[in-house]
Image (cartoon, rainbow, N blue to C red):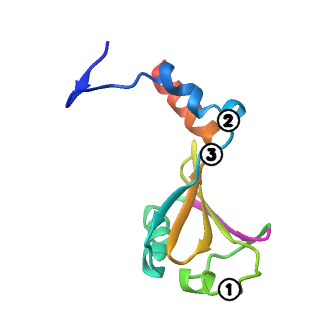
Amino acid sequence: MSREHGGVADLLWDDVKCFFDPDLMGSLPDVRVPDASIEDWQTVPDLVAEKGWKCQYSEGGTVLPAPRAEVVLSRPADAECPDLRVWPTADVLAIFRFHAADEVDFDVEADRVVLLADSQVR
């Protein structure tokens, strides 16, 4: 059954799930939040801690305790790009990459989104 909201029809999962197939489309495009600040970046680990979400911080493949955002973003330009993996639920993984202080950059594991959506459709 199709519904409309403000003249726009609901999307049906079966019509769009191919766009989230990692074998067909590769990884989801990165999500970027432009014009960010170090304080904006700090809200990410603060939210993770507040919600009690599982997370893992790493630099060059080495897992480390997560420092404050200003420490991560002040590393030398030739240093490995650190990442913060966050599991808001067991089925969803968001990976934040600390490329630049003025842009929050992250992506979501596509296979986890597809599996979660498929299980809710059935």
Measure the alpha-carbon separation of dots 1 and 2: 32 Å
Answer whether residue 89 is magenta in the image.
Answer: no
Mark 3 and mark 2 in contact? Answer it, CB < 8 Å.
no
- Residue at horizontal 71%, vertical 72%? 81
Number of numbered discs on residues: 3
- Residue at horizontal 50%, vertical 26%? 16
Q: Return the x and y of residue 62 as percentages of the image width and height.
A: 79, 70
Q: Return the x and y of residue 12 as percentages of the image width and height.
A: 42, 21
Q: Secondary structure at mark 2?
A: helix
The front one of 114 and 8 is: 8
Q: Return the x and y of residue 10 as percentages of the image width and height.
A: 33, 25
Eye-nearest disc, 3 or 2: 2
Among numbered discs 1 and 3, the one appearing first in the sequence? 1
Kindly report the secondary structure that dominates the magenta region of the rendered protein: strand
Q: Return the x and y of residue 89 as percentages of the image width and height.
A: 52, 47
- Residue at horizontal 66%, vertical 67%? 83
Q: Secondary structure at mark 1?
A: loop
Write the start and end of the magenta stretch as one range: 54-60
Residue with the mark numbered 3: 109
Residue with the mark numbered 1: 75
Measure the alpha-carbon separation of dots 1 and 3: 26 Å
* Amino acid on which disc 3 is placed: Glu
Among numbered discs 1 and 2, the one appearing first in the sequence? 2
Measure the alpha-carbon separation of dots 3 and 2: 9 Å
* Amino acid on which disc 2 is placed: Pro
- Residue 22's disc is 2
